[in-house]
Image (cartoon, helix red, strand yellow):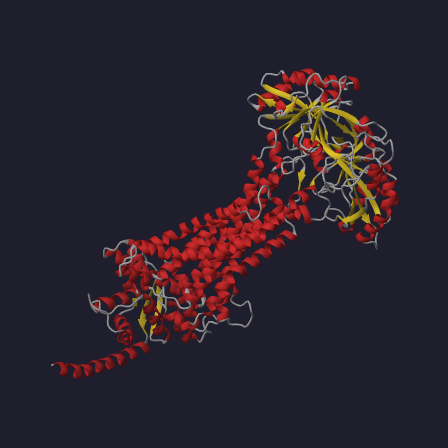
Amino acid sequence: MPDWREELRARVEPAHLEATREAEIVEELVQHLEERWEELVGRGDVAADASRTVLEELDDMLPARLAAVERRASNAPAAGEPTAAGPFTGLAKDLRYAVRQLRRNPSFTAIAVLSLALGTGANTAIFQLLDAVRLRALPVPEPRQLATVEIQTYGKGRSGSFHGRAPGESRLTNPQWEEIRARQEGFRQIAAWGGERMDLSRGGESRWADEIWVSGGFFPMLGVRAAAGRVLGPADDHRGCPAIGVLSEPFWRREYGGAADVVGRTLTLDSHPVQIVGVAEPGFGGVEVGRGFDVAVPICAEPILHAEETELDKRNHWWLGVIGRVKPGWSVERASAQLAVASRPVFEATVPPEYNAQDAKDYVRNRLSARPAASGVSPLRQTYVSPLAVLLVISAVVLVIACVNLANLMLARASARQREMGVRLALGASRGRLARQLLSESLLLAAIGTALGAALAQVLCRFLVAFLAEGRPNLSLDLAPNLTVLGFTALLGVATCLLFGLAPAIQASRTPPGEALKASARGVAGGKARLRLRRSLVASQVALSLVLVVGALLFVRTLRNLATLDPGFSGRRIVNASVELAPLKPTREQVGRVRQELLARVQKLPGVASAAAVEVVPLSGMGWNDDVRAGDPSAPAQLATFNRVSPGYFATMGTRLLAGRDLDARDTRGTPEVAVVTETFAQRYFGGANPVGKTLAKKELAGKPDRVYLIVGLVPDQKYTDLREEFLPIVFVAEAQDPEPKLHMELLVRAEASEADAVAAVKRTFAELAPSASLSFRTFESLTRRVLLSERLMATLSGFFGALAALLAMVGLYGVISYTVTQRRSEIGVRIALGAERGDIVRLVMGEAGWLLAAGLLAGGALALLLGGAARALLYGLRPADPATLAVAAATLASVAALASFVPARRAAGLDPTRALRDE
Amino acid sequence: MAKPVDRELKKGSAELLILSLIAVRPRHGYEIHKLIEERSGGILRFHAASFYPLLYRLEKKGLVEGRWVEKPDTRRRRYYRLTRRGKAMLAERRSLWNEFVLAINRVAGVENA
């Protein structure tokens, strides 16, 4: 037997009786229904029919009659009116009632809560990430006083070698830092830092640590204390200082298990011993957001760790950042103005001797400035803020769609509950009270949805970070939800509640009670206005969905364009092995031979199709450029991109030769220096003529003659630093002719079959030949994947949101179309009775959907064009107003609409006209 | 199948029916409801939604009195019995009704004869 209790409670509830009396009545009525049901079943009714009959006998007037009886008897206040005048009287009751209403409609509640949770969850997750990357202040005292010192004008007069963890960030040289420190006036304390990845191992496979170089003032300026031992101070920062290090707290736990006696121990960085003097306090991960550090070493110890390759006094090695605390009473703007004034002497004192007169003139014209850095500096910020901002907009649109969808569902429910509302109005409940009742349902839904969304956000956020962490070993973001994030989520909750709850509440409270009471279950009073509202809601839902589907297609196609473009080489089955030869301690003269021997051994390994050494691994983010003069002798030198490769490089990378010959064994230290160039190089320097046989001159340090190369080959264009860039003019020079062979070696190995086998073979060879050399491996595909990280992020998330939006649009359309069909039942009945074909009816109903779709697509198309500009920078190989994309998106939504309206259309076509008319 | 009688007539007579049925002994709601249907040969039927409010109105007026009774092996039920005022009201209603029916019959019956 069915349990009627809930149903009865819900029906008696609107009478607003005193609780014990209500319980009594419910119990009595439950007994009545049960006995009536048993009677019907006993007479031979099917259980389901009996249930229906029983419920039909319990018509809608019950609460009104009950309220009338009970009120007359006790002179109680009118049903639905608060007894006391307080604004919150009855709120608990409203909420209790709302809980019951929601429990009565589990499928509605599930859809509502789920779509809200997805919407708020996505928004919160992305906001949380944005907050962590962009907004959160550094965990140091008074972060608002912090500012960085940067070079304001880029480009001109800055060349040389750029190191550091953040390519593209304004970096400074050590001589500049020393000048800035001496000449600045606006900072109370100022410090420099740089950083690189260093090898902890003493041979064999590398284990990387994130090392940062810091000036003596770094820790004191930031106010960071030691958790054990001491931090570095100004006394540690002097020329010729010993190699000492301070560990970060996470590194200390990870590497030393938090051992108390870590101070005084020694660790190895790039094969050099470094003495540990302390551990920094927990929570401090440096000043770069998203990237923690493992070991901090004084800048002055750089000559020890880099040995003969020291950069400390090189004026064209850009590797430091400068950050300081502005003096009390000084603003960042004022400090910046002072730096601008001090710029000239700073640059004049640090002109790189390698520069020619023009470069030197450009160089001293650079200007320094200060920028607020309360939230630290972030390489992540540059890369991800605009994708995250676009994602935040997308997820906000998803939330709006979810709300519109809900508003629509609530309106549909409001129609079904029209009589209940009418009865309550007739009994004297105020319109405000009714609106409040409906709003409390929305509030409850919004609260549940938002709470679930907040939980979902934590999962989503971690997924996003895992996504971003690929290829960033020390990605550390503080993702603990803080007040800003919680506030944002709460705001979302309130906004969504108002967004989807207010319209139905206002609509319901406008209903004239008399009409509502007269209205039959279908022919609903005020239905016209409500239907108009619902239609426009669905149309706007279609419009917003179109925007998201267009966005998803644009990002997916961008990813596809980039992933399928021809980079000029093939990375398939290629492994990149990085080898550190320093631990072998070869003499300067031996290095070149050691490199050649190791390469020769690797090339002969079973499972290795071919192998080559290369200075700059393509797409690794590294780079090398120099000024080159070629062709027209009167033309000024232009910047060209360089790479140094061994014979077999082009074969390994699958690059064919267009003209001339490959670099080979003939090219040695004793023969004329040779080069292979790309088509863009030939175009730029020789106007497209065949460059083979011609020469190019690379500018050398001041006082040295230009280095002249004979061009022996021409290869197709290829990508260098990333996939989005225009093809650069590249010069490949011969590894064997390197005047200063490096201790660091990058090998590219094309595997015959499995990459893992090739890696194992290379490892074995090194273990046998050079056990102390350190090694690390990555596949070339992982490089490509990392290069396309933000594109994949955009494509994945916008694709997901686009699909979600289309699904919600389907639900919305289906709801409205089925409702219209129900409303037009008798009209459709008449049409069928008059001989309309099934096809006519299907066309009639689907035509309605067609109009909504057309209106939505029109508005959505305009909106997509309007918003597309914002995403322009994130696209590749297509414009935001791509007609094919718009067409595909519109077609997608059209099929969604067809699907959503076909079911109600078929139901309408299958209508039995006699029944439809009789029911009227 | 008997046709239900006119709404107004039914409503006016409903109180009388309920009072009569519990005049002999206390009965519970469903029993009263069922007896009305049975004894009228299906001509008089109430929906629960109108029957119970009616019953409660009689109770509020002090004409009937409901009381929860729990017997071993059966569920707790609410039995309604006539109060003193109810008895007086029933007597008054009965005589009024009889007069009314007589009057109608006198007019309608003669015309038809």
Dividing the picture into quadrants, the one containing residue A181 is top right
B83 in relation to A528, above or below: below
Q: Nearer the viewer, residue A309 or A519?
A: A309
Question: Would residue A642 be seen by someone viewing this image from the given angle?
Answer: yes
Q: Name the residue at 48% across, 63% down.
A: A504
The vertical placement of A16 against A692, above or below, is below
Instruction: Describe residue A550's horizontal placement relative to residue A840 as left or right.
Output: right
Quadrant assignment, res A12: bottom left
On the rendered structure, is A641 left or right of B95?
right
Relative to A411, residue A807 above or below: above
Q: From the viewer's side, name the closer residue of A575 and B72.
A: A575
Q: Position of residue A223 (x, y in %)?
A: 79, 45
Q: Determine the residue positioned at 75% across, 48% down.
A: A373
Can you give x and y, in whole percent of width and height, for residue A36 in the image?
Answer: 29, 60
> Do we see residue A162 in this rendering?
no
**Numbered circles on residues, count:** 0
- Look at the image and tell me in which quarter the N terminus of chain A lies: bottom left
- Toward the viewer: A562 or B28? A562
Task: Give the image location of residue A904, x and y in percent.
Answer: 36, 54
Instruction: Find residue A738 and report its image quarter.
Output: top right
Residue at (77, 17) in percent of width and height? A670
- Which sits in the foreground, A736 or A693? A693
The quadrant in which the C terminus of chain A is found is bottom left
Percent position (x, y) of residue A699?
79, 30
